[in-house]
Amino acid sequence: MHPYIGSGPYCYANSLAMLLGPDAPSPSVIEVLTGSPFGFALIAGRLPFFDPYGWDPDRGLDDALDLLGWTCRRDGEDDADRALAMLREAVEAGPVLAGPMEIGLLRHLPGMTGPIESDHFVVVLEVDEALVRFHDPHGCPYATLPIPDFLAAWRADTIDYRSASYPMRTAFRRVREVTVEAALRAALPDAVTWLRGRADVPVPAGTVGGAAAVHRFADQVTDGLDPAVRDHLAHFAIRVGARRLADAGTALAGLGHDRAAAVATRQARLVGSLQHDIVNGHPASAADTLRQLAPTYDELATVLG
């Protein structure tokens, strides 16, 4: 097993690590604690994500914070002026985790000129009369945006799981001491529940998960993908999915769950191998890989459970 170290779209895990400061575990550990590696979902029957059916980053952040013994305050606003005032006041006390945001409206990023219905999280550092300054974990420390541009992205109208407009988290506070190992062990029952599918979370209409969803998506790959779905896979979903599973394998090995670690690592290898085939247009090979991947979610649930 070879742990992955490198770049990747871990925006909320990286942002949370920045907020927790010197007591923070690595973003790789945070990502595993969110539950994101433990499943597959096909949103509206067509858009693939290598994360669980019914899961979303907001829920994942709540779960990770609780497992680590931390709490925070969550806020939102309906009005842009009130949201800006809320952000100004909050940042006086310390950095603010802003998100989800619409990444397509973050105009400091090359190629981002309009909404693409994709979420992002940043750490706001300062707000002056004209600019918002923030650490963007997508490779842009001390980035700035004019206030109207920042507000447009932060409103997050296109992000369906957001709990409020202009969402943010502040007042991060440790309420109990928890080791990283203890947090990871405590996360395992939820990991099994995610893998087996859970009935206690709202799911968008038409969304499916688990092995059946992977097989359905393999058929779609064989039939020919919509270019937007192919770009989503090539630029985001495969990269983050493979990394999540690689990090899960590393975490499980560290806990002594060798059989589970081997399954998660095999999943990471399968998902990672999709990158070449999707980018270079080899649908038969990609579909075969997905069909090999499909039964591994139940296998991982069995060895963990």
Image: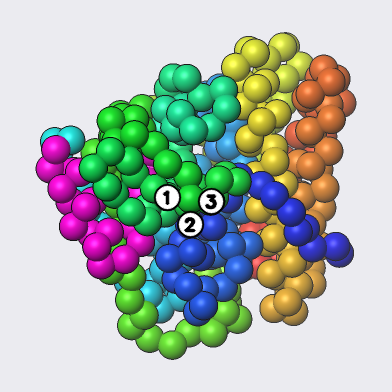
* Residue depicted at x 79% and y 33%: 275
Q: Position of residue 128 (x, y in %)?
A: 27, 47
Of 139 and 75, the residue lying toward us = 139
Q: Secondary structure at mark 3?
A: strand
What label does residue 141 carry, if any?
Answer: 3
In the picture of the structure, the residue carrying the numbered disc 1 is 134
Q: CA distance from mark 1 to mark 3?
A: 7 Å
Position of residue 174 relative to residue 9, above or below, is below
| The residue stretch that appears in magenta | 81-101
Element assignment for label 2? helix
Drawn side of residue 194 relative to residue 246, left or right: left
Pointer 1 or 3: first along the chain: 1
Give the SS element for disc 1. strand
Residue 305 screen position, x and y as percent: 62, 68
Q: Residue furthest front?
A: 129
Instruction: Return the disc, 2 or 1, that comes first in the chain's sequence.
Output: 2
Let me know if residue 89 is in the magenta part. Answer: yes
Which mark is first along the chain, 3 or 2?
2
Question: In this rendering, is residue 107 above or below 197?
Answer: above
User: For the N terminus, which image quadrant?
Assistant: bottom right
**What residue sits right under mark 2 in the picture?**
15
Disc 1 marks which amino acid? Answer: Phe
Residue 210 seen anywhere in this rendered image of the structure? no
Q: Nearer the viewer, mark 2 or mark 1?
A: 1
Q: Quadrant of residue 111?
A: top right
Identify which residue is drawn at 55% across, 64% down.
30
Q: Amino acid at mark 3?
A: Pro
**Disc 2, disc 3: CB below 8 Å?**
no
- Disc 2 residue type (three-letter): Ser
Q: Is residue 260 magenta?
A: no
Asked whether residue 108 appears in the rendered view, the answer is: yes
